[in-house]
Image (cartoon, grey):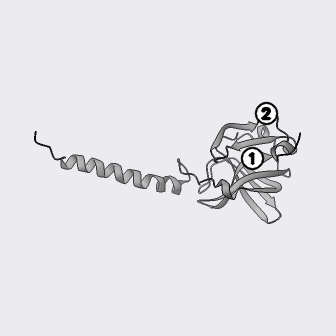
């Protein structure tokens, strides 16, 4: 049984598909959209406290898609990415500029510079789990199981 050689059209199709797969992540990163997101490094997870300066809910070029907090900390202003599944309605977040919060998350780089990928957001009255321990955004992030801020830090309720 003679084997058939692939035609030039088949080679061309394979080449086009390979090129598209190679450039798609770069195009998505350049536009600030798509499936490309910084890796969550749990080994470098930190806890920061600060005051909410601004809540940014719209898409801005170079930033990760989703809700951001600009947080004033002791070491300067920090861009905190809450995630793509966080409600855009700031009233439903229960957050307002001037409120003191605590964030547990991992630093990462985005198109516009460094960002803290928030895993847990702790306010005076609630705890919002935004990502799982691997950094994957939790759908419909919000208060989980009535946890208190003290319980989220490993303390007793």
Q: Would residue 39 appear left or right of 86 to someone viewing this image?
A: left
**Relative vertical location of residue 144 with respect to residue 24 in this rendering, above or below:** above
Residue highlighted by disc 1: 120
What's the residue at 23%, 46% (across, down)? 10
Residue 152, quarter of picture: top right
Secondary element at tag 1 = strand
Secondary element at tag 2 = loop
Q: Would residue 22 appear left or right of 70 to someone viewing this image?
A: left
User: How far apart are labels 2 and 1 at the CA level?
Assistant: 14 Å
Whole-percent x and y of residue 37? 57, 52
What's the residue at 62%, 55% (across, down)? 63
Front residue of 131/67: it is 131
Earlier sequence position, callout 2 versus callout 1 = 1
Residue 101 image label: none
- Check the picture and name the quadrant holding the C terminus: top right
Front residue of 97/104: it is 104
Whole-percent x and y of residue 147? 82, 38
Q: Residue lying furthest left in this view?
A: 1
Q: Are marks 2 and 1 in contact (CB under 8 Å)?
A: no
Q: Would residue 118 appear left or right of 73 to someone viewing this image?
A: left
Residue 76, quarter of picture: bottom right
- Check the picture and name the quadrant holding the N terminus: top left
Front residue of 6/150: it is 150
Whole-percent x and y of residue 66? 65, 46
Residue 145 image label: 2
Mark 2 surroundings: few (<14), some (14-19) or many (≥20) residues within 10 A: few
**Relative vertical location of residue 143 with respect to residue 104 in this rendering, above or below:** above
What's the residue at 83%, 55% (across, down)? 51
Mark 1 surroundings: few (<14), some (14-19) or many (≥20) residues within 10 A: many
Whole-percent x and y of residue 124? 88, 45
Q: Residue lying furthest top in this view?
A: 145
């Amino acid at each position: 049984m003679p084997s058939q050689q692939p035609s030039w059209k088949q080679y061309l199709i394979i080449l086009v598909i390979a090129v598209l797969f190679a450039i798609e992540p770069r195009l998505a990163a350049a536009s600030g959209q798509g499936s490309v997101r910084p890796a969550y490094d749990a080994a470098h997870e930190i806890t920061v406290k600060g005051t909410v300066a601004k809540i940014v809910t719209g898409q801005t070029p170079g930033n990760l898609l989703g809700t951001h907090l600009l947080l004033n900390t002791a070491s300067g202003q920090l861009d905190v990415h809450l995630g793509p599944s966080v409600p855009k309605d700031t009233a439903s977040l229960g957050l307002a500029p001037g409120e003191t919060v605590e964030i547990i998350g991992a630093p990462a780089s985005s198109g516009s510079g460094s960002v803290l990928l928030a895993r847990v957001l702790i306010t005076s009255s609630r705890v919002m789990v935004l990502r799982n321990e691997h950094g994957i955004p939790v759908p419909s992030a919000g208060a989980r199981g009535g946890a208190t801020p003290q319980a989220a830090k490993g303390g007793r309720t």
